[in-house]
Amino acid sequence: MPKLTVDGIEVEVPPGSNVLQACEAAGFEIPRFCYHERLSVAGNCRMCLVEIEKAPPKPFASCAYPAAEGMVVHTDSAMVRNARRGVMEFLLINHPLDCPICDQGGECDLQDQAMGYGMDHSRYAENKRAVKDKNLGPLVKTVMTRCIHCTRCIRFATEIAGVPELGATARGENMEVGTYVEKALSSELSGNLIDICPVGALTSKPYAFTARPWELRKTDSIDVLDAVGAAIRIDARGAEVLRILPRVNEDVNEEWLGDKSRFAVDGLKRRRLDRPWVKRDGRLAAASWAEAFAAIAARLAGLAGERIGAVAGDLADAESLIALKDLMAALGSANLDCRQDGARLDASRRDFYTFNTGIAGIEEADALLIIGSNPRREAPVLNARIRKRWNGGHFPIAAIGPEADLTYPVSWLGEGPQALVGLQDGSHDFAAILRAAKRPMLILGQGALARPDGQAVLAACWRLAAGLGMLTEDWHGFNVLHTAAARVGALDLGFLPGPGGKGLAQMLDGGVDLLWLLGADEFDISRIGAETFVVYQGHHGDAGAARADVILPGAAYTEKSGTWVNTEGRAQRGFAATQPPGEAREDWRILRAFSDVVGRTLPYGDLAAVRSRLEAAHPVFGRTGVLPRFACTDHSGPPGDPAVLSEAPFVPAVANYYQTDPISRASATMADCAATFVHPVPAAPVPAAAE
Amino acid sequence: MQTALSAQPDSFAFDAESEAAIAPILAKYPPGRQASAVLPLLDLAQRQMKRATGSAWVPRAAMDAVAARLAMPPIRVYEVATFYLMFNTRKVGTWHLQVCTTTPCWLRGSDEVTAACRRVTGITGWGETSADGLFTMTEVECVGGCVNAPIIQVNDDCYEDLDAESTVALLEALKRGAPPPMGSMKGRQGSAPEGGPTTLTTIAE
């Protein structure tokens, strides 16, 4: 642990730290452009210069200089200030003075640091360098004359995103950052380039010229468009959500965010359900809340509990899930299901359906087996964590399923469950690698579970985990990777068929007379029986609403304070950034109001009371944000007959990353992305919406 | 500068002569470090293009072929190929006139040499190719022969001690397809003084 003195303050930093980190530890902010904590050190912007005593009398780039014992560093001497001013002057030689029309204005590192080190005029009268803008696809807008060649984007694409497509071509005055051959950046994490670009060279294309950062109201929330539960900040102006940015959460998303989660915001404004609708004479007609409730109550009258069913969608918050579950219980129904994809999940023990290693825990693993999942599409931020671990070296990865580019090398063991057998009996080489590993882990995707033999696959994977030393007293290497943000919360709350209750498959084809869809659009709606009365409670006019007899307009995730449990089993709270549009309301309030109409009033009147009810239902809702590290001593696995394992190859759960839910299907930006990246363009199920 | 992509061929494959040279180059680097061979392989590609088409350049397809051979992302090869001026990323003439205009050559009359080149080839600007496709003129920084300045490097060979007259003679010879022997155009030996040695004229007893 080297000890240094920075401007008279003694600090001790971990071995391997650089001088910049030491200065930060001492509480001094060092200006920088190219240095980024999560990227390799380039040392080319020269802004972080400091003076070091008893070293050659010159300024040192602190980001690229290792901290050493006894070093005396000055961060604000005359030499340092002059040197930084010189660097800033050089950077501004070719940087255009277009801050008034630059989207980075107000949140620009160069603008901020020019306030500290820039001159009030330029000594250069020559023409500025002009650089052609690049087309990086529908998400990232480029204004390359603003580029200061920090190479952060190149390093991000190469190291974190794993798509080495950006580079610096030519040299000197002619150097340009780009792809050389024009192409859209094929990464699900490309939006992060906008965040890491310290100037306005890379900005958001959909958000271009929309707002200034100081006009925005910022609300902390949780992303629900995949099951990772990335921390986000919702930037809104008035009633409109304008953009979504990631927040730092080291345990989940570090500081990254997937493109769908970031750019699907325009979907929040389109195809919204903003008032109740009731079907009259075969056509949906606008109605009041009272009329909508009355229509449902009329259909419910005299209906036995077993003829009523409820299906929870993939974006539902835990508050509305518990309210719907309680309502169904009050109506005497045990017909509940949250597994729209038909995944054969086993909720009898929590570690049968969560990502027990933890996302941060991936970094401690030393071998990985991926089964029936494409984490790059199902959870890009989690995939970045796997890649980060792989970058660290000595991390053999194998996968079972159709071959795909996961951004790290993978040995493909087979396409279907039969490969599991080879691992189980040790006939496959990778079994030996897993057995030799100290902390091996497996990731089981929904693609392996949402099939007729899903239960057997689950059981086989658990046996594999137990047999290959993945379950120990201080390590839990069995992981289920979900794709739906609501899924783990719903399983925790037992949103599954109760005793004698029907699952989704039995509720279809006329299995129930009244079906309550809580934002459920992801199953085959056409299989709902013709005579079934469908109540659709949700926020978008998607597949479910098109079939509904009554539509109850709910709130999207940016419009309600809700709790979601991510794939790790981490309960997290999001906060409302805007109001729901029109007459739409928070979902649990709708259910509470309806329960009043049918005389089965739910026993909670405010959010605090709902949350106490949640906590009573499962203790995980009492400790939001945190996640204990799991271990496994009880090796007894879920039931499942290995004999029924079929030979059908696994089909990963997400074929089109950009359009997986009602919000992203309503987004024009995501439609653009799908047209650009998903070839051939799949015929997205866009039913005629009730607008 | 040279990023404009002109008339790119659709494909590129190393021929037998190049293939024979690749194996010993790759053998120099430990396994997993083949990317170190990117410079020699680009050079081989450029020479193969010279053999095959008469123009020494590295088309994009060739960069992709190098990338595939060395298992590196294509952009990493593009970066290298565009960084080094010795690789031509667009088509050049049969004779690539690399005229040095750095200070020593300039002091010794590179302006005169440049003007002569323009007059004979009809080229008006740097980086352009003559109408007959014979010549491309490129302005280069020091090619390392200042003692015999001014210099033109034609393809791989340096012609030194040029003036307007000898430049014209050189270019006319090139037009005829008969390049003179490389080296000083004044006939001096290596970089020895003009007119023969002035010191150490006799061998000490």
Image (tube, coloured by chain):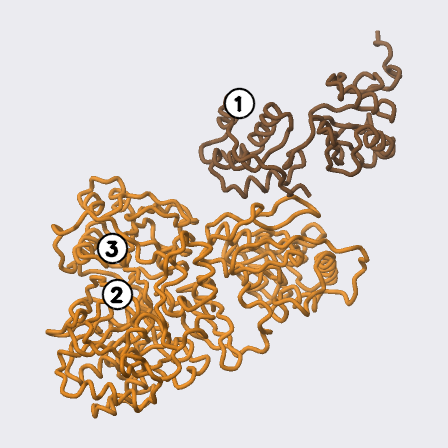
A500 versus B94 height, above or below: below
Check disc 2: other Cα within 10 Å, few if <14, some if 14-19, many if 20+. Answer: few
A636 versus A616 height, above or below: above
Have a look at marks 3 and 2 and say if they share a chain.
Answer: yes
Q: Which residue is mark 3?
A: A448
Question: What residue is shown at x 27% (from left), y 56% (from top)?
Answer: A447
Residue B200 appears in view:
yes
* Residue in front for this viewpoint, A332 or A50: A332
Q: Which residue is mark 2?
A: A524
Left or right of A92? Residue B146 is: right
Left or right of A305? Residue A631 is: right
- What's the residue type where badge 3 is placed? Ala
**Can you tell which chain is drawn brown?**
B
Q: Colour of chain A?
A: orange
The residue marked by circle 1 belongs to what chain?
B
Q: Nearer the viewer, mark 3 or mark 2?
A: 2
Q: Position of residue A67 (x, y in %)?
A: 57, 55
The residue marked by circle 3 belongs to what chain?
A
- What's the residue type where badge 2 is placed? Asp
- What's the residue type where badge 1 is placed? Ala
Q: Nearer the viewer, mark 1 or mark 3?
A: 3
Secondary structure under the numbered disc 3 in the rendered image: helix
Residue A603 appears in view:
no
B57 versus A66 height, above or below: above
Left or right of A501? Residue A314 is: right
Check disc 1: other Cα within 10 Å, few if <14, some if 14-19, many if 20+. Answer: few
Q: Quadrant of the C terminus of chain A?
A: bottom left
Q: Quadrant of residue B93?
A: top right
Have a look at marks 2 and 1 and say if they share a chain.
Answer: no
Q: Tell me the distance, in whole angstroms, between the alpha carbons under discs 2 and 1.
A: 60 Å
Q: Tell me the distance, in whole angstroms, between the alpha carbons under discs 3 and 2.
A: 19 Å
Q: Which residue is mark 1?
A: B21
